[in-house]
Image (cartoon, grey):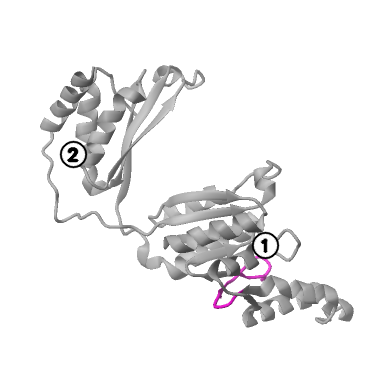
């Protein structure tokens, strides 16, 4: 069986001339990551909406999400996660934990991960004071910035030293960014426009740098262990191209080829690099004795 697979792959590769184009070099891309913080997500009391929204925002700008992590409201976990992500060099969005309740640890953990302290940011102080005044609606007691309640609200503006403000169009209480990490509230209605602002303000030069594309087809009754050597062979011979497989036990509600066990097999990467790899993947799959059904 191993010899048959090798023969099939060799036949597929002979059909496609592999040319390393000097005009389309494989360039290292900035990676974008997401950290979602909150016990309510891990317990199932709330469904995460941040990842799907960030993927949407990135894709609209020709970017993609490289990784995502879910973390509990635990200071040790948060600090360890942030230490790793600060060291990665990635562009990271972190949601949740930047309020002023006892279970909000993100601001302090970010400072600890960076080996620094938090301090009240002067612009955040002004914005929070303005929010307090507007919410007071003329009531002098509620507007008094020196009350214990209002003094506590200023804690939401205590960020790691050296942080910059992320404006919050929803209620003016800002988030912060430092070392290409962007900290926003856990409320999706606030987080979404703040993440969009960060991308448009700080990373516009990365938009649509690469003509990213994805192609796939259906392999009825495909077996991943049989297809894996072909997938590895394609990636080894076409730098910059990623091969993926999405197995399914079948979905009778869709009918047709989708009703039975199948694999969606495909490639993704710079569109300029895909054509030869696509031909080789299709030929190799057919040489292994499988049928191919194109996705319309």
Tell me the element at label 2. helix
Where residue 177 appears, as percent x and y from the top left, is 54, 69
Where residue 91 appears, as percent x and y from the top left, is 45, 61
Instruction: Identify which residue is drawn at 45% across, 63% down.
Output: 87
Above or below: residue 20 compared with residue 158: above
For the C terminus, the image quarter is: top left
Q: Which residue is mark 1?
A: 105
The reply to whether dot 1 and dot 2 touch (C-beta < 8 Å) is no
Q: Which mark is residue 88?
A: none
Q: Is residue 123 magenta?
A: no
How many neighbours does mark 1 have within 10 angstroms: few (below 14), some (14-19), or many (20 or more)? many
Q: Which residues are magenta?
A: 160-175
Q: Quadrant of residue 157?
A: bottom right
Q: Which residue is mark 2?
A: 276
Q: Earlier along the polypeptide chain: callout 1 or callout 2?
A: 1
Along the viewing direction, whichever of 201 and 295 lies nearer the viewer: 201
């Amino acid at each position: 069986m191993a010899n048959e697979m090798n023969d099939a792959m060799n036949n597929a590769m002979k059909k496609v001339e592999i040319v390393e184009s000097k005009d389309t070099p494989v360039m290292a891309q900035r990676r974008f990551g997401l950290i979602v913080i909150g016990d309510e997500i891990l317990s199932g009391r709330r469904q995460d909406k941040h990842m799907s929204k960030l993927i949407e925002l990135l894709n609209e700008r020709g970017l993609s999400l490289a990784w995502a992590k879910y973390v509990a409201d635990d200071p040790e976990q948060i600090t360890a996660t942030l230490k790793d992500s600060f060291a990665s060099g990635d562009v990271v969005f972190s949601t949740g934990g930047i309020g002023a309740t006892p279970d909000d640890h993100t601001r302090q953990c970010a400072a600890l991960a960076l080996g620094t302290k938090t301090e009240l940011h002067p612009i955040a102080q002004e914005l929070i004071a303005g929010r307090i005044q507007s919410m007071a609606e003329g009531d002098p007691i509620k507007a008094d910035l020196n009350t214990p309640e209002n003094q506590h609200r200023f804690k939401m503006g205590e960020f790691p030293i050296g942080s910059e403000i992320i404006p919050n169009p929803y209620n003016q209480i800002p988030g912060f960014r430092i070392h290409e990490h962007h900290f926003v509230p856990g409320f999706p209605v606030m987080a979404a426009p703040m993440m969009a602002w960060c991308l448009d303000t700080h990373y516009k030069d990365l938009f649509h740098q690469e003509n990213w594309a994805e192609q796939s087809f259906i392999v009825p009754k495909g077996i991943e262990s049989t297809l894996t050597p072909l997938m590895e062979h394609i990636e080894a011979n076409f730098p910059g191209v990623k091969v993926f497989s999405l197995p399914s036990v079948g979905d009778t509600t869709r009918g047709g080829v989708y009703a039975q066990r199948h694999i969606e097999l495909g490639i993704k990467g710079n569109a300029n690099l895909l054509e030869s790899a696509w031909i080789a993947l299709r030929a190799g799959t057919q040489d292994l004795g499988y049928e191919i059904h194109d996705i319309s």
